Amino acid sequence: APERLTVSVVGTGYLGTAHAAGMAQLGHDVVAMDVDAEKIALLSACELPFFEPGLGALLRKGVESGRLRFTTSYDDLAGAGAHFVCVGTPQAPGSCAADLRWVEAAFGELAARLTGPALIVGKSTVPAGTARRMAETVRRITGGDRVEVAWNPEFLREGHAVEDTLRPDRLVFGVETPRAEKVLREVYRPVIEEGCPVVVADYATAELVKVSANAFLAMKISFINAIAQVCEATGAAVLPLAEALGYDDRIGPRFLGPGLGFGGGCLPKDIRALYSCAGDLGLDEVAAFLRQVDVINLGRRDRVLALGRDLLGGSYAGARVCALGAAFKPNTDDVRDSPALAVASAAQAEGARVVVHDPVAVDGARRLRPDLVYADSILTAARGADLVLLLTDWTEFENLDPAVLSPVVRRRNMVDGRNLLIPARWRAAGWAYRA
Ligand code: UDX
């Protein structure tokens, strides 16, 4: 059996909560900390402050086994040997760069309290150079190298947090000393023994692996969306084209889904942080290359809006619009940088009355866009609609039956922003269908 370690986790958002519950599942004693007392109260009662399949059960298992507990005080973390910093690095207000204030606070607060040898491991997504600066901060506060710093980026996807945490594709350790590598290998021993590859590198490389991975995924989506525009202009069909591309195993079939494009708390901010960083480094061509990924992606929202406007005869003014989807992707209630909400809001700004339905994201959406109207079922949202915009690829929407929707809408206009439906089926039912 692996050695039972005591680890701490700072920040209990998606990443921190999944990591804390995952560490307890691996057999460690875990104390997870957040400055948000409300979140900590929920988690201590085994309740997730967000929607994530399977994570609630893992949380409960950890808490009930006595291996996982929560606190609002940094003081309770001092006894752990490894500390994982999982705080957010959102896009800084008024800039494309990442806001590092929470990372800096976490390293500072930890360093001030750690009296014995320890390792502070950054998991947050940060620009290259951050780990080095954090190591200097820690050295200054502790007055030596008793407390070390490592960077161990996290690749988890929302909706798959549990499997990505317990069975990651790879582990990346950004370390400066053999001691730090040894601690990380010990922490992850059960995962490594199951065959998970480990890449050991320096700080800057570990930091860049994460943003490069997300930038690549974003680029793949924008690539197929760029080709989709060429397809539309030439009468070619992008779906069979993408399928054919995907059979080449150098390309691979995933993240080639054309449509409304990417959103969420990671891809958009990471591509922006990377081109902003490339620009700061004087790498103008690199910055321009990466910026186009964002430009193409944001252009998809306009394209979906334009398809709807066409179906309405040239204007949204006075139209009743049913928006299906608010989350940035299915199986999450996350509405950060959601293309779905952006399109719904833009249609409303053009004079439509928009009613939004999402299987789980309505509460979060209402907080972010209180000006939109929300409905708790597809049929309520669609009642009297002149246009249906399908904006998030939930299975619930994929299974929609035109025979069920037709009687409730006023006009049979469908824009399928995710290429989710079977066009022939909708057209046969009398719908004007665009995708
Ligand atoms: C992403 C990375 O996948 C993950 O490895 C990293 O740790 C965090 O960022 P996540 O933000 O959960 O994860 O979303 P992801 O599943 O990657 O989807 C991103 C967006 O791309 C969604 O808006 C999705 O709708 C869109 N997408 C995805 C497409 O538009 N087309 C596709 O083919 C695939």
Image: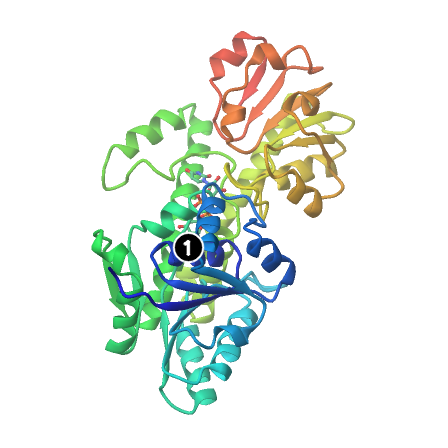
Work out whether residue 115 can be spotted: yes
Q: In this image, 136 relative to 91: left or right?
A: left
414 and 281: which one is in front?
414
The number of numbered badges drawn on the structure is 1
Q: In this image, 226 relative to 417: left or right?
A: left
Where residue 245 appears, as percent x and y from the top left, is 29, 33
Where residue 157 appears, as percent x and y from the top left, is 43, 47
Quadrant of the image occupied by residue 91: bottom right
Q: In this image, 93 relative to 203: left or right?
A: right
Where residue 222 appears, as percent x and y from the top left, is 43, 43
The residue sitting at 53% across, 62% down in the picture is: 70
The residue to which callout 1 is attached is 289
Q: Residue furthest right?
A: 318
The residue sitting at 35% across, 87% down in the picture is: 145
Where is the N terminus found, in terms of image quarters?
A: bottom left
Placement of 385 over or under 257, stated as above or below: above
Mark 1 vs ligand 1: CB under 8 Å? no
Quadrant of the image occupied by residue 40: bottom right
Q: Residue furthest front?
A: 65
Task: Give, as a three-letter code, the residue at label 1.
Answer: Phe
The residue sitting at 50% across, 36% down in the picture is: 330
435 and 175: which one is in front?
175
Where residue 141 appears, as percent x and y from the top left, is 47, 88
Work out whether residue 435 can be spotted: no
Q: Residue furthest bottom?
A: 143
Q: Quadrant of ligand 1?
A: top left
382 and 411: which one is in front?
382
Placement of 362 over or under 423, stated as above or below: below
The residue sitting at 27% across, 78% down in the picture is: 177
